[in-house]
């Protein structure tokens, strides 16, 4: 792909900064909202959901490129005001789709990011116009576009002068009818191999059904996505478009609550609950971390007991192994800017309880053994 002069992989990956939000960094950026803006109330409720979940960007279509000319085409400027207002009131950024020069003109100064949808991925005139603006552009992959075509579409925007492009995988057309499209998660890895641009995933338009959105979202993070764009509606059954794939507020929040663990497992971060700067929000985060610490200690203890089963009673304590562990963790702590003394003081305690539990479980096993031998002998 020689023509990826600007979009092609470089020594460093690009991050895109929008008003304090970094896309393509360590943090997974959650974006959510309804398919189409319908009312001020609907947008306020959606913004509240996104905020509660820890999302950073509110979405909502006001110019809808619909497959049928008879489907709802969007509220236009009136809808844009609802989107912008709701985002502002909830301290969120906002994104909306543009479909032509006119809609781009109308929204560009009002939203934080613009979206070019799957149906317009190869609308080259629109791509060139998006290259002239100073706002980040989320470029969705066309439903029948190869990864190369998608990256070349990004190249159009970059070549026209806008370096802020975020690629969005949203499912492609395959022979499989059980989902609306097929989410191509390999495209995340391939796009990141070929390009320095951030890549996000929209599981909603891929699946077309809400029951698998949570698992696809987690898989997307595991596959290396830098963010998620997910449809949520205060009342999906009443949605004017894409209701079946929209999560309820509860589902959206529940999913967000589960994302942190997946992000952590691939050395990324997602903080459920957003802001993190009020005392209450910070305490909620601490409570969640504390619960995780205790759960991990319980897991550790269980493994320690299994290890005990493989040791002789007089060899339960293993000072060499303990020193090795402490040394490794002291180094890790220093790397993570934790005081090494914390490890030095904490771990002897953890070891002590581990050894005690091994001894206890061995003595109990010995007693059982003795009892069964005694029963055997007395038979
Ligand atoms: C959308 O995000 O509202 C949309 C129409 O998505 P896509 O372009 O991926 O179909
Ligand atoms: Mn939609």
Image (cartoon, rainbow, N blue to C red):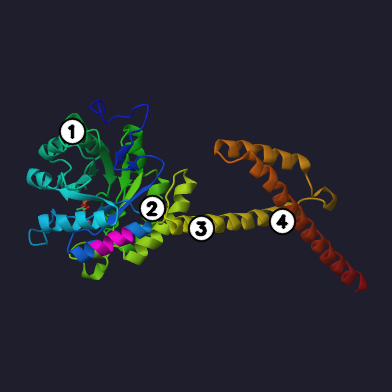
User: Which mark's residue is nearer the viewer, 2 or 1?
Assistant: 2
**46 falls in the magenta region:** yes
Q: CA distance from mark 3 to mark 1?
A: 44 Å
User: Position of 43 compared to 312: left or right?
Assistant: left
Q: Nearer the viewer, residue 159 or 244?
A: 159
- Vertically, is 102 above or below 272? above
Q: Which residue is mark 4?
A: 305
**Numbered disc 3: secondary structure:** helix
Q: Which residue is mark 2?
A: 275
Q: Residue at x 33, y 43 (%)?
A: 20
**Numbered disc 4: secondary structure:** helix
**Numbered disc 2: secondary structure:** loop
Q: Residue at x 11, y 62 (%)?
A: 71
Q: CA distance from mark 2 to mark 4?
A: 40 Å
Asked whether the residues under the numbered discs 3 and 4 touch, taking CB atoms below 8 Å apart as contact, a structural biologist would say: no
Total numbered badges shown on the rendered structure? 4
- Vertically, is 269 above or below 161? below
Q: Which residues are magenta?
A: 44-50
Asked whether the residues under the numbered discs 3 and 1 touch, taking CB atoms below 8 Å apart as contact, a structural biologist would say: no
Q: Earlier in the sequence, mark 3 or mark 2?
A: 2
Q: Residues within 10 Å of mark 1 (few under 14, many from 20)?
A: many
User: Position of 241 compared to 300: left or right?
Assistant: left
Q: Which residue is mark 3?
A: 288
User: Which mark's residue is nearer the viewer, 2 or 4?
Assistant: 2
Q: Earlier in the sequence, mark 3 or mark 1?
A: 1
Q: Residue at x 82, y 48 (%)?
A: 315
Q: Earlier in the sequence, mark 3 or mark 4?
A: 3
User: Which mark's residue is nearer the viewer, 3 or 1?
Assistant: 3
- Vertically, is 72 above or below 103? below
């Amino acid at each position: 792909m020689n023509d990826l002069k600007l979009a092609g992989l470089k020594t460093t990956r690009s991050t895109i900064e929008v008003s304090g939000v970094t896309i393509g960094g360590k943090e997974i950026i959650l974006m959510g909202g309804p398919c189409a803006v319908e009312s001020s109330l609907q947008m306020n409720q959606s913004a509240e959901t996104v905020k509660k979940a820890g999302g950073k960007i509110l979405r909502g279509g006001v110019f809808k490129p619909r497959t049928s000319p008879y489907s709802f085409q969007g509220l236009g400027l009136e809808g844009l005001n609802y989107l912008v207002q709701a985002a502002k009131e909830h301290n969120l950024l906002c994104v909306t789709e543009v479909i032509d020069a006119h809609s781009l003109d109308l929204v560009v100064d009002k939203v934080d990011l613009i979206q070019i949808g799957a149906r317009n991925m190869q609308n080259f005139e629109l791509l060139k116009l998006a290259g002239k603006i100073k706002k980040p552009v989320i470029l969705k992959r066309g439903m029948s576009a190869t990864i190369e075509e998608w990256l070349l579409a990004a190249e159009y925007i970059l070549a026209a002068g806008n370096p802020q492009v975020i690629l969005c995988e949203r499912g492609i057309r395959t022979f499989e009818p059980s989902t609306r499209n097929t989410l191509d998660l390999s495209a995340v890895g391939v796009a990141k191999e070929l390009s320095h641009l951030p890549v996000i995933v929209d599981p909603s338009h891929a699946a077309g059904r809400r029951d698998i959105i949570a698992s696809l979202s987690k898989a997307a993070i595991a596959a290396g996505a830098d963010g998620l764009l997910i449809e949520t509606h205060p009342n999906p059954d009443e949605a004017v478009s894409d209701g079946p794939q929209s999560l309820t507020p509860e589902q959206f929040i529940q999913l967000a609550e589960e994302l942190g663990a997946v992000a952590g497992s691939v050395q990324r971060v997602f903080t459920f609950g957003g802001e993190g700067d009020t005392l209450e929000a910070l305490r909620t985060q601490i409570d969640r971390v504390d619960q995780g610490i205790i759960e991990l200690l319980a897991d550790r203890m269980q493994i320690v007991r299994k290890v005990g089963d493989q040791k002789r009673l007089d060899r339960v304590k293993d000072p060499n192994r303990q020193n090795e562990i402490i040394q490794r963790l002291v180094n890790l702590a220093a790397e993570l800017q934790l005081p090494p003394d914390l490890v030095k003081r904490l771990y002897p305690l953890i070891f002590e309880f581990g050894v005690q539990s091994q001894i206890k479980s061995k003595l109990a096993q010995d007693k059982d053994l003795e009892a069964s031998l005694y029963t055997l002998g007395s038979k």
